[in-house]
Amino acid sequence: MSDSATPFHSIDATTGATVGDPIAVHGLADVESACAAAEGAFDTYRATSREDRAAFLDRIGEEIIALGDVLIETAMRESGLPRARLEGERGRTVGQLKLFATVLRDGAYLDLRIDPALPDRQPLPRPDLRLRKVPVGPVAVFGASNFPLAFSTAGGDTASALAAGCPVVVKGHPAHPHTGALVAGAIARAVEASGLPAGVFGHLVGPGNDLGAALVRDPRIQAVGFTGSRGGGLALLNLAQAREVPIPVYAEMSSINPVVLLPHALAARGAALGTAFVGSLTMGAGQFCTNPGLLLAIEGEGLDAFVEAARTALTDAPAATMLTQGIHAAYSRGAEALAGHNAVETIARGKVGEGVAQGQANFFATTADAFLADAALGHEVFGASSLLVRCRDEVEVMAVLRAAEGQLTATLHMDEADMDFAAKLVPLLERKAGRILANGWPTGVEVAHAMVHGGPFPATSDGRTTSVGSMAIDRFVRPVSYQNLAPVLLPEDLRDGATGAPRLLDGQRA
């Protein structure tokens, strides 16, 4: 600890008790050291081969697996999440690392392009032009509270930035400091075993905002990855834009993930949909950024059956431990605000829990007119809370969707007879969301090449990007064009006869 700062403790999420010895807080001098080390490592790391970086990512995954049960048990204690969920999350974390190792070995992310010189072209000759994407530089990554493994120290932001060739400095989330330290140690061992400079990875710990603010302000940091609240993301975005040299902040922030229940689907299976909805809503105490926080449906018998089934299922839903007492307090305030709103009906509330930070599930309803009159009804309540908007007709459904903010996901539950209405909705949903689902629930996010986990503001700060899937690497590279350079000066991938990565040659896939 380089600066004077009060140590803090890890907290058992279930009991609220402090665990273990006090944790030393990194200070501003540590931020300086970590950023200097990252900058010092950048040129060496960016020059490594794609195969060497792929092997490094694989090695990180191996080191995480080697942590064994201690990692799972530590994360269980600090997050309150069950073993099965965290074992699955560990698998996803390692799977993300493997995905980006595959992306590196393929090389398509480099977007190699060659337009050969045309010296005899009239009226002017064309120069020799060659393009590839290069890493942007050191990246700051903020660990997320709700995914202590897959969106934190070695999560998707870290994996994609390291794959791009960027050193990473992580600001660990204070809700799971021991979990983060274990994973950071695994990454450090992989760095050393791979013969890379130590500055390729840095890890900073502290409960306050000063550490993260200093990290974003440091002129050596060239991009930021963040998953968290809208307030936190906007604060980082403002800091980054106020720098002498502004940098991009890729922040995933706020989404209520509208689910549209189309009439024929409701008529055919309203009760089954109601039960399935509650299962999605209450999964993980509702602490998913893709939680179904908004439902839209046209009044009728099918909707009545849906509501009654959801009421029954939710009334029986046990309270669940939320990640932190702060998250629980914010959730409770949001739910009580809806419960006390004069235009909102409380359909059902789950069981009240005993103990610390027990999140009670909530299901509310309002009208389209009320939703359109009060923008606050469209704000996220992070937890197992959802709002049904009762609509009179298709026109009101579309009006509510037009008024909704940008979203990570939008879902259509439909049958064949609903296709005409669905065809009207899809173009609208393309403007609102990064992922459109049919006849499913948004709480599962597949790690795959075609996945988009992003969306228009405020779902993210840059709706052109994704934080999950192979395209996540695009956030941490930028294009460089080389004009008339001698072959000896060109990157190897752009030289004539180079093999190993796909390229466009005079506009044709070579």
Image (spheres, rainbow, N blue to C red):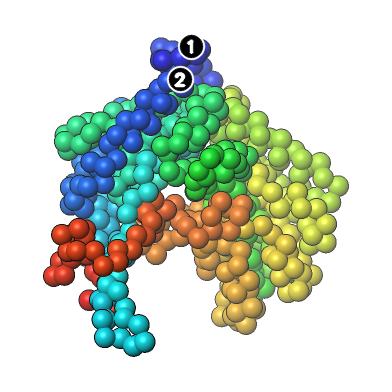
Quadrant containing the C terminus is bottom left
258 relative position to 134: left or right: right
Is label 1 in a helix, a strand or a loop?
loop
Graded by Cα atoms within 10 Å as few (under 14), some (14 to 19) or many (20 or more), the crowding at tag 1 reads few
* Residue 437 visible from this viewpoint: yes
Instruction: Please state the horizontal and vertical placement of residue 315, each as a whole percent of the image.
Output: 66, 44
Q: Which residue occupies the foreground of this view, 273 or 101?
A: 101
For this view, does 452 lie left or right of residue 99? right
Q: Residue furthest front?
A: 123
**x, y (%) of residue 353?**
61, 31
Q: Position of residue 220 (x, y in %)?
A: 41, 37
For the residues bearing labels 2 and 1, Cβ distance under 8 angstroms: yes
Rendered image: mark on residue 4: 1
Binning the other alpha carbons within 10 Å of mark 2 as few (below 14), some (14 to 19) or many (20 upward) gives: some
x, y percent for residue 474: 39, 57
Amino acid under label 2?
Answer: Gly
Q: Quadrant of residue 138?
A: top left
Mark 2 lies on residue: 27
Q: Residue at x 17, y 38 (%)?
A: 194
The reply to whether residue 500 is visible in this rendering is no
